[in-house]
């Protein structure tokens, strides 16, 4: 899923509508979590919200969307609550009632960007003390509807945004069947119940307090800070960088190396961050580390700020040391922070605070079709004096978004740190065990073909009595074919190198989604060629097993190969490896 902020959000031009609900007066008081108190206590300000945008898969009228939205609000208690300033100035939380409202068109002026109008709306409506502090917007275009749902961070986290979108789509589907989606909503467990459970929890044991104290002391008596200069220690306009660290292939390779090392993908990322921090700053990696607090399954379908802050300290750029650091951070975040941080009068925040967030969408129990919906996680635009790094891992790969002060020093230092980090992680993926083939005591490596490999691939394709007749001697035609292959993300053109870095084999893999066989995805293997000197030694079999794993990682449940009917030895080879002649393949020139 694409990570972005409101400035860089990809929005079509169209009529922009917002749904104004009616909110009651403040009702009974509700418990306030530690993080809510900290966030809301900073006061009303622009840029304290988060959002998710997506395109509706079918044409829908605005009234149906409004009904579905009211059903979502009715299901999740935190969307029916609002903050107020108490007599002592501290924020208090109260229950409110939400009633149907009306759609209001927000005019986009001449020369004005849709993003700017949307930003002004969400800054105004989704503020900490808003009543309510959430907003539903719809962009109407000839191509369809784009929905943007935003809420102040005090009421939602990234996981919550997925729950909200999933429930809105479910309510819309229910409305199509003739049922009134807001008539009898099934309530999810309320976030305030979670808050109360944490407030009632036993205080943290002494060893947890001591560890927090040590990490804060190592950070100069404050929460961990970015280890390099960010310029003047005051809020500046933000600079947001969005980078695609891995595509699906490199993500799988990075994860395979992590498994081989006996650690998680997150731990391997921490290894890279630790190494880069040591290289550029000569210090350990120390960062604020948000961890989710949905400890029980009951909270998986709830909406709220189910995040608590922990601290991560990684001294060694070594897999098991990094895994231990991540485990410790999760444990340190499992206790009520108000009690832990009481000696500092709350969280000791200072300019330059450094935070790292990691979310693997593939492992969440809540899923949406982010590709089909063109879904985007959207952060607000704001001033900042610290560095916040978000990682999102999904079916398309690993993506990061980084926010830091837009100063000359921060551009150099944070930007340089990011450059080194991405380069280190990509190098780790390329050297992963996933690309390594062990055959009869020898080591080969599978990697994605580059333009420089075209001549070697063409030579392999023509290196037999069949290929000699039908392959071309004109490299220009292979160049054109290569360009077409690399433009299509469903294709993987691979080469195999030996220990001397010579290309000794090639194959093309294509992932083919479909509706037959119950919507199965297939892996097509074409052009598998092994150099004459390496044949009948097990390399072809190892390549096929690698290809099968490649397909499984992309959801393929069936592998298929075509070969010339006259290739008796080739067909015998595939048969030995479990392939069956179950279908008749037909070909013709066109």
Image (tube, grey):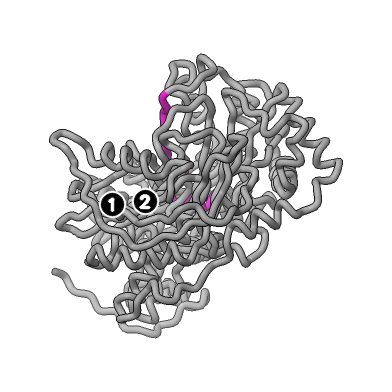
Q: Is the residue 590 above or below the residue 334 in the image?
A: below
Q: Position of residue 416 (x, y in %)?
A: 49, 24
**Residue occupying the point 30% across, 52% down:** 137
Between 370 and 399, the one nearer to me in the picture: 370
Indicate whether residue 241 is drawn in magenta.
yes
Q: Earlier in the sequence, mark 1 or mark 2?
A: 1
Residue extent of the magenta highlight:
237-253
Residue sitting nearer the eye, 573 or 389: 389
Quadrant where the C terminus is found in the figure: bottom left
Of 118 and 582, nearer the camera is: 118
Find disc 2 in the rendering and name its residue.
Answer: 135
Residue 277 in the figure: left or right of residue 531: right
Tag 1 near tag 2, CB within 8 Å: yes
The local crowd at label 2, few if under 14, some if 14 to 19, many if 20 or more residues have their Cα within 10 Å, is many
Assess disc 1: are there few (<14), some (14-19) or many (≥20) residues with their C-alpha within 10 Å of its C-alpha. Answer: many
Q: Which residue is mark 1?
A: 18
Name the residue rendered at 67%, 59% in the picture. Answer: 295
Task: Tell me how far mark 1 sits from mark 2, CA to CA.
Answer: 7 Å
| Residue 491 appears left or right of 447 | left
Q: Which structural element holds mark 1?
A: strand
- Residue 199 drawn at (x, y percent): 72, 51
Q: In the current view of this chain or complex, which residue is farthest to the right?
A: 206
> Residue 384: where, in percent of width, then height?
48, 27
User: Which quadrant of the structure image shows residue 340?
Assistant: top right
For this rendering, which residue is in front, 478 or 30? 30
Residue 428: mark in rendering: none
Place of residue 91 in the rendered image (x, y in percent of width and height, measured from the top left): 57, 41
């Amino acid at each position: 899923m694409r990570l972005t902020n409101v400035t860089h959000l990809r929005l079509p031009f169209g009529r922009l509508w917002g749904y104004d609900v009616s909110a009651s007066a403040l009702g009974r008081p509700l418990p306030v979590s530690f993080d809510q108190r900290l966030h809301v206590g900073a006061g009303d300000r622009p840029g304290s919200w988060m959002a998710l945008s997506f395109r509706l898969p079918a044409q829908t009228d605005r009234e149906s969307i409004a009904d579905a939205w009211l059903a979502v609000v009715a299901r999740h208690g935190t969307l029916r609550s609002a903050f107020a300033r108490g007599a002592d100035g501290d924020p208090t939380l109260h229950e409110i009632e939400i009633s149907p409202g009306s759609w209001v068109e927000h005019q986009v002026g001449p020369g004005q960007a849709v993003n700017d109008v949307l930003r002004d709306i969400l800054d105004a409506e989704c503020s900490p003390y808003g009543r309510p502090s959430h907003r539903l917007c719809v962009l109407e275009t000839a191509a369809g509807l784009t929905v943007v749902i935003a809420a102040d961070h005090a009421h939602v986290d990234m996981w919550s945004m997925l729950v909200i979108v999933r429930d809105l789509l479910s309510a819309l589907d229910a409305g199509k069947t003739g049922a009134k989606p807001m008539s009898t909503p099934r309530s999810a467990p309320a976030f305030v119940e979670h808050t109360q459970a944490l407030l009632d929890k036993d205080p943290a044991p002494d060893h947890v307090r001591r560890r927090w104290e040590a990490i804060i002391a190592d950070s100069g008596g404050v929460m961990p800070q970015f280890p390099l200069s960010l310029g003047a220690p005051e809020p500046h306009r933000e600079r947001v960088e969005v980078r695609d660290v891995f595509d699906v292939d490199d993500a799988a390779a990075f994860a395979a190396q992590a498994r081989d090392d006996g650690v998680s993908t997150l731990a391997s990322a921490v290894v890279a961050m630790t190494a880069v921090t040591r290289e550029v700053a000569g210090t350990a990696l120390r960062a604020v580390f948000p961890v989710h607090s949905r400890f029980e399954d009951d909270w998986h379908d709830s909406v709220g700020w189910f995040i608590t802050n922990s601290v991560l300290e990684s001294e060694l750029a070594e897999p098991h040391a990094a895994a231990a650091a991540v485990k410790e951070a999760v444990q340190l975040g499992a206790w009520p922070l108000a009690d832990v941080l009481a000696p500092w009068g709350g969280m000791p925040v200072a300019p330059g605070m450094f935070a790292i967030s990691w979310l693997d969408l593939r492992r969440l129990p809540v899923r949406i079709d982010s590709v089909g919906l063109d879904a985007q996680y959207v952060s607000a635009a704001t001033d900042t004096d610290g560095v916040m790094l978000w990682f999102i891992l999904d079916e398309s790969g690993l993506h990061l978004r980084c926010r830091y002060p837009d100063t000359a020093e921060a551009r150099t230092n944070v930007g340089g740190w990011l450059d080194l980090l991405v380069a280190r992680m990509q190098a780790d993926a390329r050297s992963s065990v996933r690309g390594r083939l062990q055959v009869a005591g020898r080591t080969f490596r599978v990697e994605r073909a580059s333009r420089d490999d075209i001549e070697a691939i063409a030579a392999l394709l023509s290196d037999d009595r069949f290929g000699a007749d039908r392959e071309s001697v004109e490299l220009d035609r292979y160049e054109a074919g290569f360009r077409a292959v690399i433009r299509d993300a469903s294709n993987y053109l691979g080469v195999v190198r030996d220990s001397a870095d010579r290309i000794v084999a090639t194959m093309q893999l294509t992932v083919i989604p479909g509706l037959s066989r119950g919507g199965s995805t297939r892996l097509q293997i074409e052009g598998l060629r092994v150099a004459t000197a390496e044949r009948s030694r097990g390399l072809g079999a190892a390549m096929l097993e690698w290809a099968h794993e490649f397909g499984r990682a992309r959801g393929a449940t069936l592998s298929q190969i075509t070969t010339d009917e006259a290739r008796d030895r080739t067909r015998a080879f595939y048969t030995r490896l479990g392939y069956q002649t179950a279908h008749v393949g037909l070909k013709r020139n066109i």
